[in-house]
């Protein structure tokens, strides 16, 4: 009988659990994340599509690959037009950066792989020291489109699978290589400005535990031409920044001393690429909360108890001053008179509450409030000495609203500069000091020439569209460099992109955010880390600067040969606006041809 009672009690207890007894704080099991035993720096769920290729790849293998394309973690690297080789040769100016991509792969598991950079020496005994050569591990991140996809849209990806793409740099000391896998290593040689012209060579050594060392030859020919420091570049680079993302990702209080220290490191890459514009926000969350970590307002609008208004510029001043300390000091853009949804936030002094109001451009309330703000803002900028470099920024808004906002700003004071990012509209042309056109929605060549002649600046931008060319993690890297050649061909002044750092939830490993194409939201990674996409964009900017300098030199030269090479360069540039197919190998060949002409001009005009 006791046994029967015990069995019944157990049955009752079990029935209570199975019936779903609820406890305080309980979470349904279907929502529970599966904990990992340790942190994985990258996802590793990809599979090989060519197992047979690994059969003859035992032992450690290494070669230089192309920086213009990507190599996949579970695939054996393959050559295209002999771009997988045991040596790498490049030509550079003094002060230029040379990028190379080294690949290590094996059918076997390897331990403690390390890459040892040498001093590069010339026959004359001059040296580019190994301290000027950095080697960084390339990590793979998750994409929602496969490599080279040309159908990406500003909406849901049609692909249900994910795809791993090599992109993020990580400090390299040594790494383990799983069996049947490939690891890219990105090499950067920063040629000192004081380097003597000549040919410099050295052997890059690859070592692993229990393996014979491999050596790859690295040769750099330094021409007698000087690339100025990035701060002196003419190219106008506008990568929109979100400093709140840096605070959130690092778990520090926004605008604290810790946050400011992190921002100094974070802005280094932007400054090092010649960053021109400081992104600031005059309103809270101007883009309708579409970022994972929203952009806060840098200027607090305060409605006083007596009905008057105050404006607190503490955060605005902190960020602008910091960016200027980092070398970004040519332009400040304040976003925006037209926040999405017309939503403005202000603090009510009497209650301490935040109030959200919709002030539509053209309304009397909009005119009154923005006139009040602009009067105070102008006074503040004059006191700081920043008025002449500040732009009021408007972004992708319907024509009626855009014109109404511009009219309000212009009517307030003729001192204001206005920048707009969006499709080309002839009726906006004379109203904008700075115009950034969405790629594919641009002025005619004649319209652009007239704009330049009037002293206005113009840039081009890409965002979640067009699908090509772009800077997504699945874009062939050459597209990032090609864009600057297109900018040269069209007579533009630079490039704009949202965004520099609008990181999603797990930016280090997963480049997707919402329905946008992977990588659309950012070009650098947390921790001050660069990536393949950023470095290829920077290469194109350097090409732009070299062509600008060579044109100036050729204009002062009496050499018929130099004039002929400039003519050939202009003929070459004419192919870029005609590009439609964006075959990665073809556009890479076009950029190589452009750089051949740069090398010839550099050599000729250095004499």
Image (tube, rainbow, N blue to C red):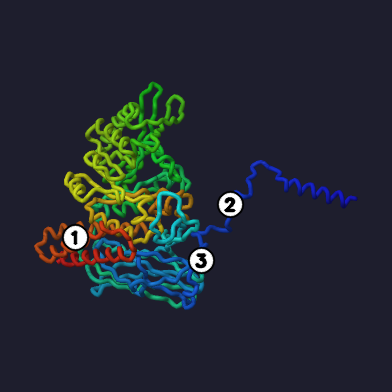
Name the residue nearer the viewer: 373 or 221.
373
Dot 2: what SS? loop
Residue 488: x %, y % from top left: 23, 55
Q: In this view, does 55 lie above or below 578?
A: below
User: In this rendering, does residue 141 appear at all?
Assistant: yes
Q: In this view, does 173 lie to the left or right of 495?
A: right
User: Between residues 222 and 242, which one lies in front from this camera angle?
Assistant: 242
Does residue 360 appear left or right of residue 456 in this picture? Answer: right
Mark 2: few, some, or many residues within 10 Å (few <14, many ≥20)? Answer: few
User: Dot 3: what SS?
Assistant: loop
Tell me which corner region of the image, top left, top right, bottom left or bottom right, holds residue 573: bottom left
Which quadrant holds the C terminus? bottom left
Against 412, residue 531 (above or below) is: below
Mark 2 → mark 3, Cα distance in angstroms: 24 Å
The reply, left or right, for residue 295 in relation to residue 10 is: left
Q: Tell me the tag on residue 570.
A: 1
Q: Are marks 3 and 1 in contact (CB under 8 Å)?
A: no
Nearer to us of marks 2 and 1 is: 1
Q: Which of marks 3 and 1 is nearer the N terminus?
A: 3
Residue indicated by mark 3: 47
Residue 569: quarter of image = bottom left
Q: Which residue is painted at 28% across and 30% down in the image? A: 375
**Left or right of 176 in this view: 152:** left
Distance Cα–Cα, label 2 vs label 1: 57 Å
**What residue is shown at x 23% (from left), y 53% (from top)?**
490
Q: Nearer the viewer, residue 536 or 170?
A: 536
Closer mark to the observer between disc 2 and disc 3: 3
Residue that label 2 marks: 33
Mark 2 vs 1, N-terminal side: 2
């Amino acid at each position: 009988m006791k046994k029967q009672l015990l069995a019944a009690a157990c049955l009752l207890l079990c029935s209570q659990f199975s019936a779903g007894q609820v406890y305080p704080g309980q979470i349904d099991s279907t929502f529970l994340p599966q904990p990992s035993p340790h942190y994985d720096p990258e996802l590793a769920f990809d599979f090989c599509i060519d197992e047979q290729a690994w059969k003859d790849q035992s032992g450690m293998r290494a070669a230089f690959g192309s920086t213009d394309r990507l190599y996949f973690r579970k695939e054996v690297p393959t050559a295209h037009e002999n771009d997988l080789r045991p040596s790498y040769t490049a030509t550079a100016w003094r002060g230029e950066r040379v990028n190379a991509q080294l690949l290590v792969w094996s059918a076997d598991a390897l331990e403690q792989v390390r890459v040892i950079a040498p001093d590069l020496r010339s026959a004359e005994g001059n040296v580019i020291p190994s301290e000027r050569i950095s080697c960084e591990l390339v990590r793979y991140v998750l994409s929602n489109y496969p490599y080279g996809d040309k159908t990406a849209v500003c909406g849901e990806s049609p692909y249900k699978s994910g795809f791993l793409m090599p992109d993020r740099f990580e400090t390299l000391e040594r790494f383990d290589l799983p069996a049947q896998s490939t690891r890219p290593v990105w090499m950067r040689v920063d040629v000192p400005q004081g380097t003597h012209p000549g040919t410099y060579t050295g052997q890059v050594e690859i070592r692993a535990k229990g393996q014979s060392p491999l050596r790859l030859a690295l040769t750099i020919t330094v021409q007698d031409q000087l690339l100025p420091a990035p701060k002196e570049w003419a190219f106008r680079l506008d990568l929109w920044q979100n400093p709140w993302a840096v605070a959130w990702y690092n778990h520090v209080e926004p605008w604290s001393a810790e946050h400011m220290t992190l921002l100094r490191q974070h802005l280094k890459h932007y400054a090092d690429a010649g960053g021109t514009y400081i992104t600031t926000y005059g309103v809270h969350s101007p883009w309708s909360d579409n970022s994972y970590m929203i952009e806060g307002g840098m200027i607090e609008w305060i409605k006083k108890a007596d009905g008057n208004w105050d404006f607190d510029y503490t955060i605005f001043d902190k960020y602008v001053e910091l960016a200027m300390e980092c070398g970004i000091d040519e332009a400040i853009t304040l976003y925006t008179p037209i926040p999405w949804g017309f939503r403005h936030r202000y603090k009510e002094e009497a209650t301490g509450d935040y109030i959200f109001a919709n002030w539509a451009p053209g309304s009397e309330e909009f005119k009154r409030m923005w006139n009040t703000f602009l009067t105070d803002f102008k006074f503040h900028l004059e006191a700081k000495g920043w008025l002449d470099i500040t732009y009021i920024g408007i972004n992708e808004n319907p024509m009626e609203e855009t014109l109404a906002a511009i009219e309000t700003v212009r009517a307030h004071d003729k001192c204001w500069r206005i920048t707009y990012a969006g499709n080309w509209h002839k009726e906006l042309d004379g109203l904008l000091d700075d115009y950034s056109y969405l790629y594919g929605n641009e002025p005619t060549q004649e319209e652009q020439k007239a704009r330049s002649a009037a002293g206005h600046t113009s840039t081009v931008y890409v965002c979640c569209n067009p699908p090509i060319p772009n800077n997504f993690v699945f874009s062939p890297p050459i597209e990032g460099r090609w864009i600057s050649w297109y900018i040269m061909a069209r007579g533009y002044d630079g490039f704009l992109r949202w965004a520099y750092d609008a990181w999603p939830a797990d930016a280090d490993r997963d480049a997707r955010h919402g329905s946008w194409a992977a990588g659309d939201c950012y070009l650098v990674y947390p921790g001050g880390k660069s990536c393949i996409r950023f470095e290829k964009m920077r290469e194109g900017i350097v090409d732009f600067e070299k062509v600008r300098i060579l044109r100036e030199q050729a204009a002062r030269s009496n050499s018929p040969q130099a004039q002929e090479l400039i003519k050939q360069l202009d003929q070459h540039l004419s192919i870029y606006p005609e590009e439609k197919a964006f075959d990665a190998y073809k556009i890479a060949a076009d950029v190589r041809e452009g750089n051949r002409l740069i090398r010839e001009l550099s050599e000729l005009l250095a004499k």
